[in-house]
């Protein structure tokens, strides 16, 4: 391991501080899902993925690649990219500002290092990841492609077209993760449009499916390791990641309220009091 479990937990704590500070500063953004996915992105970028922050290039040849489909959780993506060396951490202070490279949803025309596709129009990221994964196979590039989706996003039809395609074409260098926190902007996923047995659905579509506790770093590392070992055996891999929206900040947990609401000054202080500063605030 490049980092110990405790080191990764400390990085995740700092990432969570970045998230609440970024969203508070501009009074806009999506803290809930970002906080819930911090452990996964830290584990990927600091431990499990083989990637080169510098020099950054869009092709990503001979390195693992990650795509964020649920682009509204850009705060966690930006923080992890900055903290892992793609661009200066100080740039996080420009989040959602006019002319900033760090817009509310990741885009490519600003040339932000680490971002290879514009995202946030839900349902599209899996298709992009499949195309990139097939491209790697054609080029005899043995590295993996990862994509993160939301659970509410599973209500999009394009997801299931892509799922069928990937299984049929044996895109087995692809690891997809669903952030299964049970909340979406309009309320609990089960109330908006129930997904029923999501693991069984993906298996029925021809994928191999694993389950993960997304807010337990040890389990995140273990399941990612298992997914890597299962890759390149004829089937794409799906990880159903159980997480808690707003994880790490007690008053943000257990509700969809903090999907897209910024904390006020008092709420920010309460949040920061619960999150250890480990790498230095920007």
Image (cartoon, rainbow, N blue to C red):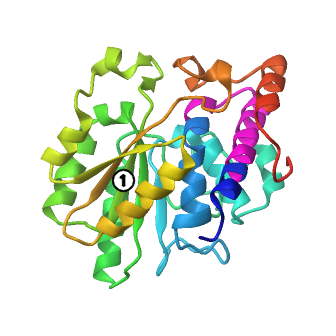
Q: Is residue 116 left or right of residue 122?
A: right
CA neighbours of label 1 inside 10 A, class few (<14), some (14 to 19), many (20+): many
Q: Residue at x 82, y 53 (%)?
A: 279
Image point (18%, 47%), residue name: 203
Seen from the viewer's position, the closer of residues 211 and 26 is 211
Say whether residue 19 is magenta: yes
Determine the residue positioned at 27% across, 50% down: 209
Q: Which of the 4 image quarters holds residue 160?
A: top left
Is residue 135 located in the magenta-colored stretch of the structure?
A: no
Q: Can you give x and y, in whole percent of width and height, for residue 129 in the image?
A: 37, 59
Please say if 48 is above or below 124. Answer: below
Q: Which residue is mark 1?
A: 176
Q: Does residue 98 appear in this view?
A: no
Q: Nearer the viewer, residue 63 or 280?
A: 280
Range shown magenta: 11-33
Q: Is residue 200 left or right of residue 225?
A: left
Question: In the orientation shown, which residue stands out farthest toward the bottom?
Answer: 140
Residue 265 in picture, x, y percent from top left: 84, 21
In the rendered image, the quadrant that contains the N terminus is: bottom right
The residue located at (79%, 60%) in the rendering is 88
């Amino acid at each position: 391991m490049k980092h110990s479990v405790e080191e990764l937990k400390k990085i995740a704590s700092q990432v969570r501080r970045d998230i609440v500070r970024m969203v508070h500063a501009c009074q806009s953004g999506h803290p809930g899902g970002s906080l819930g996915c911090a452990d996964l992105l830290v584990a990927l970028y600091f431990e499990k993925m083989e990637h080169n922050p510098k020099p950054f290039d869009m092709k990503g040849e001979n390195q693992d690649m990650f795509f964020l489909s649920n682009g509204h959780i850009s705060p966690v993506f930006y923080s992890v990219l900055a903290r892992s060396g793609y661009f200066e951490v100080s740039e996080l202070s420009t989040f959602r500002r006019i002319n900033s490279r760090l817009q509310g949803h990741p885009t490519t025309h600003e040339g932000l290092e680490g971002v290879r596709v514009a995202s946030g129009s839900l349902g599209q990221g899996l298709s992009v990841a499949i195309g990139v994964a097939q491209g790697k196979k054609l080029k005899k590039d043995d590295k993996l492609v990862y994509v993160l989706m939301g659970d509410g996003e599973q209500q999009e039809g394009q997801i299931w077209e892509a799922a069928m395609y990937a299984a049929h074409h044996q895109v087995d260098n692809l690891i997809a993760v669903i952030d299964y926190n049970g909340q979406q902007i309009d309320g609990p996923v089960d109330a908006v449009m129930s997904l029923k047995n999501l693991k069984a659905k993906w298996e029925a579509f021809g994928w191999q499916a694993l389950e993960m506790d997304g807010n337990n770093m040890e389990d995140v590392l273990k399941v990612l390791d298992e997914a890597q070992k299962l890759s390149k055996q004829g089937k794409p891999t799906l990880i159903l990641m159980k997480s808690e929206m707003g994880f790490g900040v007690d008053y943000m947990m257990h509700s969809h309220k903090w999907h897209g609401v910024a904390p006020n000054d008092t709420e920010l202080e309460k949040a920061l009091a619960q999150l250890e500063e480990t790498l230095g605030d920007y």
